Amino acid sequence: MKTEKQPISLSEGQDIVKEAQRLLASHLASSSRRRFLRNGLTLGGVAMLTGCDLSDNTHVEQALSRISRFNDRVQGWLFNADHLAPVYPESMMTRPFPFNAFYSEDEAPDINGDDYRLEVAGLVLHKQPWTLAQLHQMSQISQVTRHICVEGWSAIGKWGGVPFAEFLKAIGADLNARYIGFKCADDYYTSIDMATALHPQTIMALTYDGQILPRKYGYPMKLRMPTKLGYKNPKHIQVIEVTNTFPGGYWEDQGYNWFGGS
């Protein structure tokens, strides 16, 4: 038997429009266009932009998902590989740097560095696993940058490690591939675009504040990207995969924006 659709309420419609405005307007270059969108976008306009019937929750989710994917594309177009995130003096570091994860600090993975092997997969020429010692033997850089959390807080920390672009070249990665996916020891997973992977400030972090990366910050290795929001920076990485198949992510699959630029 066909179930009659329940119309969304006025308040629900207003919430949909606000979310659409937020996702679309945040990356429009022209302030006049942002004002037009903020003042002129209606629920009907959202339906027209997305091609969705907004008479039930399923179609609402589809509409917002399409807008979010549009937002991903816009952020990708705007991303400039030559633009660097701000760097700070060590005197501005946040002490202590906060722990942040979907679990408590005492639940962070306890990994034996001697047994650790970083697996590489997908579109790469050299698929042999990497030991932690091999990673530490590669050329290292350090940076003092700001971690920006989607929850509204930020903190400045000093990270050291291997430029990710150099690692990708070392494993013979296809640098024309679309995505890099990460699987982690804490069951977290995420993925990034190749342009961000090759950005000069994207590093495989092996140290924090000059010391071996602490367990709570992602030992034995995390990806540090000051051009991305915090949830895009995976910790305790076990597998790196170069792929043209969209890998998604732990939070992204629950509705977070995939590109996640800061």
Image (spheres, rainbow, N blue to C red):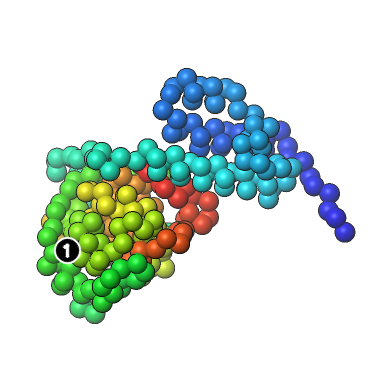
Image quadrant for the C terminus? top left
Rendered residue at 45%/43% (across/down): 73
Asked whether the viewer can see residue 238, the reply is no
| 177, above or below 9, in the image | below
Asked whether the viewer can see residue 138, the reply is yes
Q: Position of residue 182 (x, y in %)?
A: 36, 63
| 144, above or below 39, in the image | below
Rendered residue at 35%/50% (across/down): 230
Q: Residue furthest top?
A: 32
The one nearer the camera, 3 or 178, is 178
Residue 20: quarter of image: top right
Q: Is 24 left, or right, of 95 in this rendering?
A: right
Q: Residue furthest bottom?
A: 115
Rendered residue at 19%/71% (across/down): 132
| 91, above or below 106, in the image | above
Q: How many marks?
A: 1
Residue 233: quarter of image: bottom left
Q: Is 37 left, or right, of 107 in this rendering?
A: right
The one nearer the camera, 258 or 169, is 169
For disc 1, the neighbor class at 10 Å (few under 14, some 14 to 19, many from 20) is some
Image quadrant for the N terminus? bottom right
User: What amino acid is at disc 1?
Assistant: Ile
Rendered residue at 22%/62% (across/down): 169
Q: Residue furthest right?
A: 1
Q: Which residue is mark 1?
A: 212
Q: Is 247 left, or right, of 202 in this rendering?
A: right
Q: Position of residue 228 (x, y in %)?
A: 34, 47
